[in-house]
Image (spheres, helix red, strand yellow):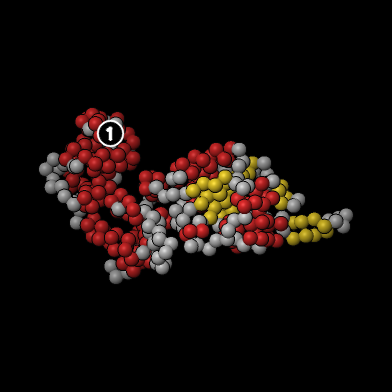
Amino acid sequence: MKPSAIAQALQTLLAIRQPAFLWGPPGVGKSQVVAQVAAAHGLELTDVRAVLLDPVDLRGIPRFDDAGATVWCPPAFLPRRGRGILFLDELNAAPPLVQAACYQLILDRRLGEYQLPEGWTVLAAGNRESDRAVTHRMPSALANRMVHLDFEPDLDDWLAWAEAEGIDARVRAFLRFRPRLLHAFDPRAEDKAFPSPRSWAFASRILAAAPGPGAAPGLLRGAVGPGAAAELLGFLDICERMPDADALLADPEGVHLPDDPAVICAMCESVARKASDETMPGLAVLASRLPVEFGVLLMRDAAAVRPSVVETEAFRGWACANSDVLV
């Protein structure tokens, strides 16, 4: 399931307080989606890294009450009130005894004398055994207590997230051109760094820090791996030679347009950021001069940047002229 479908599924499961487990390879954004769902619904999020726990950490330590009976003091990280998500991240990386300690908490919403508040739901996540990550086989008794969702990266979902998070426009344009590099993880490879939604965010932050030309290649290789870094660096060089967005909009009918698909893709990303009701006539002219797939890309991105442009005469005229490819 792509991230947006996972988010919709979690909304349903939260409504009925059904525990769920998100399965997926490293770096695809499992934890991020859970955090986004919690924020969207105004829920508190308690993120517990199960791999860091011992079995006794969940139940707590014993003490004597006033009557001399032994009672247990549950840990402070377990919620006491309100509404939220108790997120057991990396649950299947935890030792079997820790997983066993979660049985009662997940199914019965209890742990000894501790009771999970009514407004809370337990979710968990982890890598698949095939990913060669640190995992322990999940006992069938625990697996049967949860709904299991398989998490797969999706370019459109990631681009929407990246736009909102301010990910470097050049990185977004590059991944539009090379979508297979959004997540290129081979569990058989020995590479320490590889392209993933998480590592592309690292690459964006590296570029924002403006490293020197001597440092940038090594930093990017350390973030997304040598192959993806080499392609990104080549794309960045193309971006440097790309026509200026203001110059394109100043003379949309006469300016020379590039032929290289990579340059066109970068150009669309750059020009779309200039979208407004005033620049829409020029954008529409540029879109009409581009190959149809890039014209649609330009206008779609412009509408995402400034939704009001879809009401302009220029946008409507372009949409009517291209209605056969928009249906």
- Image height check: is 141 above or below 193? above
Q: Position of residue 215 (x, y in %)?
A: 32, 69
- Image height check: is 9 above or below 125? above
- Image height check: is 286 above or below 169? above
Left or right of 80? Residue 321 is left
Quarter that holds the N terminus: top left
Name the residue rendered at 23%, 29% in the picture: 320
Q: Position of residue 218 (x, y in %)?
A: 34, 69
Name the residue rendered at 32%, 34% in the picture: 308
Picture quarter containing residue 315? top left
Name the residue rendered at 40%, 65% in the picture: 189
Q: Is residue 320 visible?
A: yes
Neighbourhood count class around disc 1 (C-alpha, 10 Å): few under 14, some 14–19, many 20 upward: few
- Which residue is denoted by mark 1 in the rendering? 326
Instruction: Tell me the amino acid under the disc marked 1.
Output: Leu
Quarter that holds the C terminus: top left
Q: Nearer the viewer, residue 216 or 247?
A: 216
Name the residue rendered at 25%, 46% in the picture: 268
Q: Position of residue 303 (x, y in %)?
A: 31, 38
- Image height check: is 275 above or below 262? above
Q: Position of residue 10 (x, y in %)?
A: 53, 42
